[in-house]
Image (tube, helix red, strand yellow):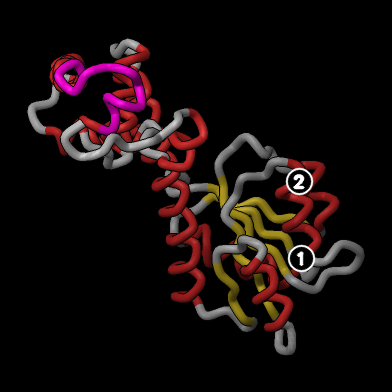
Amino acid sequence: MATDRGLVHVVDDEGAIRKSLDFLLTSAGYEVMRWEGPEAFLKGADRMQQACAMIDVRMPGIDGFELHREMQRQGFDFPVIVLSGHGDIAMAVAAMQAGALDFLEKPIDRQHLLDAVGAAFETIRDSENKFERENRAKTLLGRLTSREQEVLDGLACGYPNKTIAYDLGISSRTVEVYRANVMDKLGVHSFANALRIAFAAGLGSEQRWLSEHTLIPPSEGA
């Protein structure tokens, strides 16, 4: 069985549902772990292994909505797909508003199931790619001096050289020098590429800039 497509936790108190979902998912190449209830899942699942969780809304004891909240409290960073029976749509929607990725109404359509699980793992891959881009960008920013990072931050906020110069207490010409240094150290040939790195590393927050600097733009001609 190919398990490289990811692990899916199925949490449902109905054995027949667990067995059916196991069959559908494993036949599509997923690894499946079945849990008969929230308590067993919270106790036995490895929160550090990337996975997707399919949880039933109505279960004895802790229901699916409470389970999702408990997962968030305990650090289970899994995309969640809610399984809903007839009459449970309102609760399923509430769970989605709390962060669930999707909900599937029983009886579950095979294609809808696979589409939902595929979307869940696409979310995980997107998060990984974003994390990798952020780490790479932060590594590149490590090549810059603190002042060069400040100048890049101001540029990423959309401020002109004159405003950045005023705010940092340097000349506009010095800002231009720092900007050239930034592009050279980052190994980019266009300002747009420098900005992409800045944004990936978390720079460009005008709110943060305003909280850290006294931004009083100079008058024209000053």
Mark 2 Cα-neighbour bin, 10 Å: few <14, some 14–19, many ≥20: few
Is 168 magenta? The answer is yes
Identity, as a three-letter code, of the amino acid under mark 2: Arg
Q: Which residue is mark 1?
A: 64
Q: What residue lies at 44% left-to-right and 61% top-to-bottom?
A: 119
Q: Is residue 210 visible?
A: yes
SS of the residue under disc 1: helix
Write down the region rendered in magenta: 163-174
The quadrant holding residue 185 is top left
Viewer can see residue 1: no
In-image side of 125 versus 156 (left or right): right
* Quarter of the image that includes the C terminus: top left
Most extreme residue toward the bottom is 87
Question: Is residue 202 rendered to the left or right of residue 34?
Answer: left
Q: CA distance from mark 2 to mark 1?
A: 14 Å
* Residue holding disc 2: 73
Q: In the image shown, does 124 or 201 lie closer to the viewer?
A: 201
Q: Residue 198: x, y in percent?
A: 31, 32
Q: Given the image, on which type of amino acid does mark 1 rest?
A: Gly
Q: Is residue 119 magenta?
A: no
Mark closest to the chain's N terminus, 2 or 1: 1
Q: Is residue 57 left or right of residue 200?
A: right
Query: How far across and how far down the image is residue 86, in percent?
Result: 71, 88
